[in-house]
C-alpha cells in the first residue's frame, strides 16, 4: 500500500505523544535499555589475527578476528530485550584497571601489527577514549599481489550535563588497501599499481540521552550519524542515519518503546543512486518472573511504499535462567548499499550494480540458558529473503588479454532453513571453552524458471568456531587454541561451469606472558594445517604464519 510522507510524520508524532503521556509512578527508579560500554584498557588475550584478505569492519573492541566473514543478513542471531534495564553507567575505576595499552608485533610472512588505546576522564563530568590500530601482511613472494593492510582509529567522548542529560560524540576512520590477486598466476601477471584497490571510510556520530534515572521513568535517545566512503576507482557513497527512540517504563518492568529511524544513502559511480528507508518501530514488552512477551511491529517506508513486519517474541522460563524456551517472528528491510556490499566482499565490481533492499521475513524458536558456569543457545529458523544479494564471479580481461576475477551482485528470492548453536563452558575458574556452529540450507528454486539462481553464490552453508583460553600462573600467562571451519563456496568458473571450493580447516594456537605488571609478550601461530581455502574464487588465504611482539599496559 502507499501513503504520503505526511502520514508517516503524523503517525510518528502521535505514537511519541502516547509514550510521553503514558502512566508514570513517582519515586520509582527509571531505567534505559541502552548500555553504554565504557572503554576497558585492560589488555585481554586476543584471538588469532586474521590472515584472510577480507577487510574487517571498524571494531573498537579488544582485538578479536577470525575467518568468519562479516555477518551476512541471511544469518542473524535474534536476541531478546534484557530483563534488567540499566542506564548508561559512568565508569568506576578499580585498582586493576589500566588507562592505556600498547601492542606491537611483526611476523612471517612479512607482517606488521600495532594497536594502542587510552582512556581518560573525570568522575561525573566526562570520559573519553582514543584508539588506533594498523595491521598489514604481505605474502606476495609466494603468490603475486597477495597482500593487504588496514588502519583504523576512533575518538569517542561522553559529557555528563546537568538535569541527568548526557552527550556522546565520536569520530572514526578506516583505511583499507588490498590487491586483486585472483587470477591464473601461471599465465597472467599484474603490477602492484594495476591490481590495487583502496577504501576510505569516515564515520561521525553523536548521541543525546538521559544519562541517569529520572522520576517519570521515561528515557530517550537521539543519535545522528553520517559516513563517507570512497574507493580507488572514484566510487563514492555518503549516508545519514538518525535514530530517535523513547521508552516509557510501567511498574518498573513493562516497557513501551517507539523508535523512528530515517536511513538515507547516496551512491555515485557513473550515475547516482539513492536508497532511502524510514523505519517506525513501536513495541510493548511485558516482563514477569516466568515469562517475557514482546509485541511490536516494524513499518518501513521506501519510495512511498510501506512494508509491514512483525516484531514479536515469547520467552518462557522453565527453570529460572537455566532453561528458557523462546519463539518469535521478525522482519526487516535491509539495505544493500556500497558500504554493506564491500564490507562483505571487498573484491566486488560495484559499477552498474543496482542497489536494492532485501526483504527478510524470519521465524524462529529454540532453547537457551545460563547456569553461570554454562551458557548455551540453540535455535532453528526459517527465513524468506526477497532480493537477497548473491556474489557471482565476474571475469575482467584487460587490453593485454589478461583476466582477473572480480565479483558482481545478482539478486534472487531464497528460502533459508537454519540451525545455529552457541555454547560457553567454564569447567573451572581459569579455563573457558566456547563453540559456535551454524548450518543453513538455501533454496533458490522458487519459480522453476531460468530466473532462479543455481546456488546461493558466495554464501557459506556451514560455519564453525571453536576455542579455548586457559589462564595460568595467577593470570600472568594465557594459552589459547582456536579451530575454524567452513564449507565449500559455490561459484561459476571462467567457462561457466558450476563448482565449489575447498573447505576451511584452520587450527591456530597462541599465548601471552607478562614479565612484570606492565610489560609482556605474545605469540600467535596461525593456520597450523596450512589450509589455503579460497573464500572467494581464486583468492586463497595465507597459509601457515605467525605473529609475535610485546604488550604494554599503563
Image (cartoon, rainbow, N blue to C red):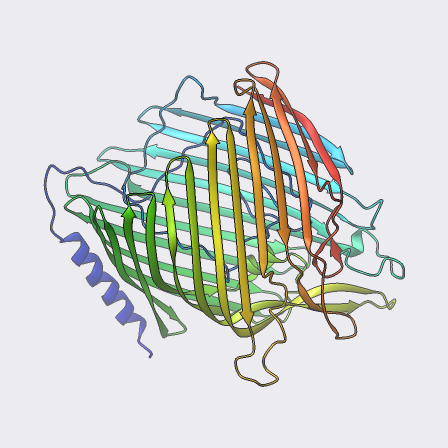
Question: Quadrant location of the N terminus?
Answer: bottom left
Q: Residue at x 26, y 71 (%)?
A: 7
Residue, far bottom: 449
Q: Is residue 541 above or below residue 299?
A: above
User: Is residue 476 rendered to the left or right of residue 144?
Assistant: left
Q: On the image, which quarter does residue 374 sit in?
A: top left
Residue, far top: 516
Q: Nearer the viewer, residue 479 or 1?
A: 479
Q: Residue at x 57, y 47 (%)?
A: 465
User: Is residue 43 rendered to the left or right of residue 8?
Assistant: right
Q: Residue at x 23, y 67 (%)?
A: 10
Q: Nearer the viewer, residue 385 or 341?
A: 385
User: Is residue 542 rendered to the left or right of residue 514?
Assistant: right
Residue 89's spot in the image, x, y percent?
Answer: 32, 33
Q: Is residue 469 above or below residue 445?
A: above
Q: Residue at x 60, y 47 (%)?
A: 56
Q: Nearer the viewer, residue 13 or 136?
A: 136
Q: On the image, which quarter does residue 14 sit in?
A: bottom left
Residue 11's spot in the image, x, y percent?
Answer: 24, 66
Residue 497's spot in the image, x, y percent?
Answer: 75, 74
Q: Is residue 281 above or below residue 272?
A: above
Residue 322 visible? The answer is yes
Residue 71 visible? The answer is no
Amino acid at each position: 500500500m502507499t501513503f504520503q510522507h505526511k502520514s508517516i510524520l503524523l503517525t510518528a508524532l502521535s505514537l511519541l505523544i502516547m509514550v510521553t503521556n503514558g502512566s508514570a509512578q513517582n519515586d520509582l527508579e527509571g531505567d534505559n535499555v541502552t548500555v553504554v560500554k565504557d572503554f576497558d584498557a585492560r589488555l585481554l588475550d586476543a584471538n588469532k589475527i586474521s590472515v584472510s584478505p577480507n577487510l574487517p569492519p571498524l571494531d573498537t573492541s579488544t582485538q578479536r578476528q577470525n575467518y568468519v566473514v562479516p555477518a551476512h543478513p541471511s544469518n542473524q542471531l535474534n536476541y531478546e530485550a534484557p530483563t534488567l534495564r540499566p542506564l548508561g553507567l559512568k565508569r568506576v575505576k578499580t585498582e586493576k584497571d589500566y588507562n592505556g595499552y600498547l601492542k606491537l608485533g611483526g611476523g612471517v610472512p612479512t607482517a606488521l601489527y600495532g594497536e594502542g588505546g587510552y582512556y581518560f576522564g573525570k568522575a561525573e563530568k566526562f570520559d573519553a577514549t582514543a584508539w588506533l590500530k594498523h595491521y598489514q601482511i604481505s605474502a606476495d613472494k609466494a603468490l603475486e599481489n597477495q597482500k593487504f593492510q588496514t588502519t583504523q582509529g576512533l575518538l569517542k567522548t561522553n559529557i555528563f550535563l546537568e538535569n541527568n542529560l548526557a552527550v556522546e560524540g565520536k569520530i572514526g576512520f578506516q583505511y583499507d588497501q588490498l590487491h586483486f590477486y585472483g587470477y591464473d598466476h601461471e599465465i597472467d601477471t599484474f603490477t602492484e599499481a594495476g591490481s590495487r584497490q583502496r577504501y576510505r571510510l569516515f564515520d561521525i556520530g553523536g548521541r543525546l540521552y538521559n544519562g541517569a534515572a529520572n522520576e517519570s521513568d521515561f528515557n530517550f535517545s537521539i543519535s545522528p550519524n553520517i559516513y563517507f566512503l570512497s574507493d580507488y576507482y572514484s566510487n563514492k557513497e555518503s549516508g545519514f542515519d538518525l535514530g530517535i527512540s523513547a521508552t516509557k517504563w510501567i511498574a518498573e518492568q513493562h516497557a513501551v518503546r517507539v523508535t523512528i529511524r530515517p536511513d538515507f544513502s547516496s551512491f555515485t559511480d557513473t550515475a547516482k543512486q539513492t536508497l532511502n528507508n524510514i523505519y517506525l518501530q513501536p513495541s510493548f514488552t511485558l516482563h514477569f518472573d516466568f515469562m517475557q512477551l514482546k509485541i511490536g511491529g516494524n513499518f518501513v517506508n521506501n519510495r512511498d511504499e510501506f512494508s509491514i513486519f512483525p516484531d514479536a517474541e515469547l520467552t518462557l522460563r522453565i527453570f529460572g535462567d537455566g532453561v528458557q524456551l523462546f519463539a518469535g517472528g521478525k522482519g526487516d528491510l535491509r539495505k544493500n548499499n556500497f558500504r554493506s556490499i564491500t564490507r562483505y566482499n571487498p573484491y566486488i565490481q560495484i559499477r552498474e550494480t543496482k542497489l536494492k533492499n532485501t526483504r527478510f521475513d524470519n521465524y524462529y524458536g529454540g532453547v537457551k540458558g545460563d547456569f553461570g558456569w554454562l551458557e548455551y543457545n540453540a535455535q532453528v529458523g526459517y527465513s524468506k529473503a526477497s532480493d537477497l544479494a548473491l556474489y557471482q564471479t565476474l571475469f575482467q580481461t584487460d587490453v593485454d588479454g589478461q583476466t582477473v576475477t572480480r565479483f558482481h551482485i545478482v539478486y534472487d528470492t531464497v528460502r533459508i532453513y537454519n540451525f545455529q548453536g552457541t555454547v560457553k563452558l567454564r569447567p573451572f575458574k581459569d579455563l573457558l571453552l566456547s563453540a559456535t556452529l551454524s548450518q543453513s540450507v538455501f533454496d533458490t528454486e522458487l519459480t522453476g524458471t531460468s530466473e532462479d539462481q543455481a546456488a546461493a553464490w558466495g554464501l557459506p552453508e556451514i560455519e564453525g568456531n571453536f576455542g579455548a583460553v586457559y589462564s595460568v600462573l595467577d593470570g600472568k600467562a594465557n594459552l589459547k587454541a582456536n579451530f575454524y571451519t567452513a564449507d565449500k563456496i559455490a561459484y561459476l568458473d571462467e567457462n561457466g561451469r558450476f563448482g565449489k571450493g575447498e573447505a576451511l580447516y584452520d587450527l591456530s594456537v597462541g599465548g601471552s606472558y607478562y614479565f612484570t605488571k606492565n610489560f609482556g609478550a605474545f605469540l600467535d601461530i596461525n593456520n597450523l594445517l596450512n589450509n589455503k581455502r579460497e573464500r572467494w574464487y581464486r583468492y586463497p588465504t595465507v597459509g601457515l604464519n605467525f605473529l609475535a611482539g610485546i604488550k604494554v599496559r599503563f
